[in-house]
Image: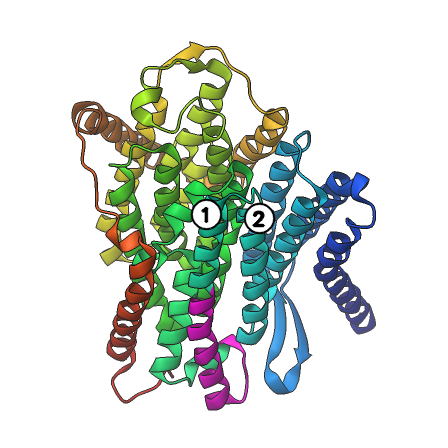
Amino acid sequence: MLMIQMETLYTMSSITIAWIALPLFIGFSIYLIPKLDRYLALGVALVSFGYGLERIDSSPLNLTLLDNFGVSLVVDPLSAFFILTNALVTAAVILYCWRSDKTAFFYTQTIILHGSVNAVFICADFISVYVALEVISIAAFLLIAYPRSDRSIWVGLRYLFVSNIAMLFYLIGAVLVYQANHSFGFEGLRQAPPEAVALIFLGLLTKGGIFVSGLWLPLTHSESETPVSALLSGVVVKTGVFPLLRCALMVEELDPIVRIFGVGTALMGVGYAVWEKDTKRMLAFHTVSQLGFILAAPEVGGFYALTHGLVKSALFLIAGNLPSRNLKELKQIAIPTPIWCALVIASFSISGFPLLSGFGAKVLTMKNLVPWQVIGMNIAALGTAISFAKFIFLPHGGEGKVKPGFWSAMTILLGGLIIANCVYYDAYTIYNIIKPLVTIGIGWLVYLLIFQRATLKLPRMLEQFDHLIGVMSLMLTLLFWIVLVQYGRNTPPV
């Protein structure tokens, strides 16, 4: 029996290493056989889907790569949910671009990005995460700047600069963790000094687009090409969220800090979104808000991440096929009914409507909140219903065409929302059904009576490039104070 277990472990370890290396190998191979670029890219996404699906109910797999440095990999159900999200979103984006004029370069960067994102989801040490995040920054920059316009290059450079500064803070924190423990492992935060925790958290919060340190996100996601926006909001930002969840689950003293930022970013994002009149900017601010739901209950963050990745990617792809980005103009234009139906399904899911996975994800998250979080997260849920009423009450019945790969992508993303609804079927109790329906109903009523007519333009000063680094400095001070309060001024995490 022991021999069988050892052989199984060895086999899974080999498969895992090969799976991590595959996207990089295929990505560079695309240049050699560019006529197969779409097929190879789609094949990699499907392999990731199969791997994630196999690991979702399996026992955790632990691999030690460099024992002296604490470099290790962990694949467990939490990882599996994020891997599935990455696989489905990447596959949908590839199908969306299937009949477009995207070159082999685009598919190469997409697959390299895909593989690097997967690497973050299985790394259990700070230095491996750092390397993967830096590769992600480069691949994401190249995708953002793909159109080669002055605007896209500026947005890409802005993203790259903010990301690299954040990773510099993160790297200093990682070095301090190693200095305290002689290991880069996540568990080293238990003995790390408060400044190490603050620096690492600043890097991850910025990379994930969380709270005020993530105010680079709305412009970046809204100004990128539609498929790139879907990738960024669907999976890339989760590379900052995942290590935070892993640290919160491994070091219980960090759990309250992660939950604080979960509530804070959920409320901040939705506070901007309810007033936003640009469809892509509204979706970008809701990415900020929904990341808060993932962080608010770390134990069940994986399922919420899957649901959010599917629905937000779908919404960005739909927004790219609407006749205008301006919601005021969309109220005067009847959009095609099939597109409107897809928009309503996605909006229902993110609002928590039953029969879609957003319902189960929200119920599961709300059941795992601590008491002080409940009011704030319910307000955020109400704000979500208000925001997406803007889409639901748009006029429809018009005519128009969509990109050739649009419905293939929608089949994966919206179909995934329906199938994933079965993950938490225990959510279907009378109370759990009535509560979100009441929240949605109140949200629609508030929208029709107030927000449909009200106009408030919130300042964008903090989103300006000049202020982003200053905001990071303020966040570092705030984080250091929170960590000191949590652990005591002279006592490191224990």
Q: Quadrant of the C terminus?
A: bottom left
What amino acid is labelled 1 in the image? Tyr
Between label 1 and label 2, give the one nearer the viewer.
2
On the image, the x and y values in percent for residue 452 come to 22, 25
Categorize mark 2 by other alpha carbons within 10 Å: few (<14), some (14-19), many (20+): many
The numbered disc on residue 37 is none
The numbered disc on residue 304 is 1
> What span is colored magenta in the figure?
164-186
What amino acid is labelled 2 in the image? Leu
Is residue 210 something that shows in the picture? yes
Which is nearer the eye, 287 or 414? 287
Residue at coordinates 76% horizontally, 53% vertically from top-left? 26
Q: Secondary structure at mark 1?
A: helix
Judge whether residue 151 is colored magenta. no
Q: Earlier in the sequence, mark 1 or mark 2?
A: 2
Q: Quadrant of the N terminus?
A: bottom right
Q: Residue furthest front?
A: 150
Judge whether residue 175 is colored magenta. yes
On the image, the x and y values in percent for residue 109 come to 65, 51
Q: Which residue is mark 2?
A: 143
